[in-house]
Amino acid sequence: MNSRILIVDDSTTVRRMVNMTLTSAGYEVWEASNGAEAIESLEHQIPDLVITDVNMPEMDGLTFVRTARGNPRIPKIPILVLTTVNDPSFKEQGRLAGATGWLCKPFQPTKLCDAVRVVLARRTS
């Protein structure tokens, strides 16, 4: 069975690019446009990995990570942050919130796929 990945980003273009990259690498992908929509999605289906942006309306990425980590009905799935924010203090906030890793946009498809493979391999080991 292919690993399932939820992409959370308010940019349709970014979601499409990440979706195409991961789908072509053999992953099953679905999308949410903000953290609140992602939390609702996680109530119905659980992915093997979540990739989220930080700056989004309704519920930003760090709030999403904190909310997901604080919800006992949501398993401790890995959450990668994919964002234009490269500030070390934000990265630390992400780590403290429970993010598994931090990637910066614009992303290179091979680097994104490599990061996804590493995180998913850690999850199964």
Image (tube, rainbow, N blue to C red):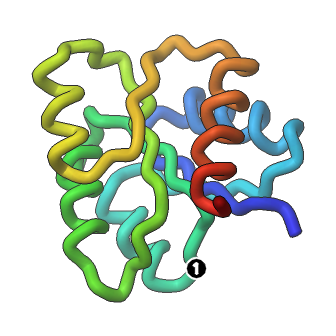
For residue 88, above or below residue 92:
above
Left or right relative to 52: residue 119 = right
Identify the residue shown where x is 30% and y is 63%.
36
Q: Quadrant of the C terminus?
A: bottom right
The amino acid on which the numbered mark 1 sits, given as a three-letter code, is Gln
- In which image quadrant can residue 2 be found? bottom right
Identify the residue shown where x is 61% and y is 63%.
48
Residue 9 appears in the picture as rendered: no
Residue 45 appears in the picture as rendered: yes
Q: Position of residue 85 (x, y in %)?
A: 28, 18
For residue 58, above or below residue 18:
below
Q: Nearer the viewer, residue 70 or 23?
A: 70
The residue under label 1 is: 45
For residue 13, above or below residue 98:
above
- In which image quadrant can residue 16 be found? top right
Q: Position of residue 63 (x, y in %)?
A: 18, 53
Q: Position of residue 80 (x, y in %)?
A: 45, 41
Element under disc 1: loop
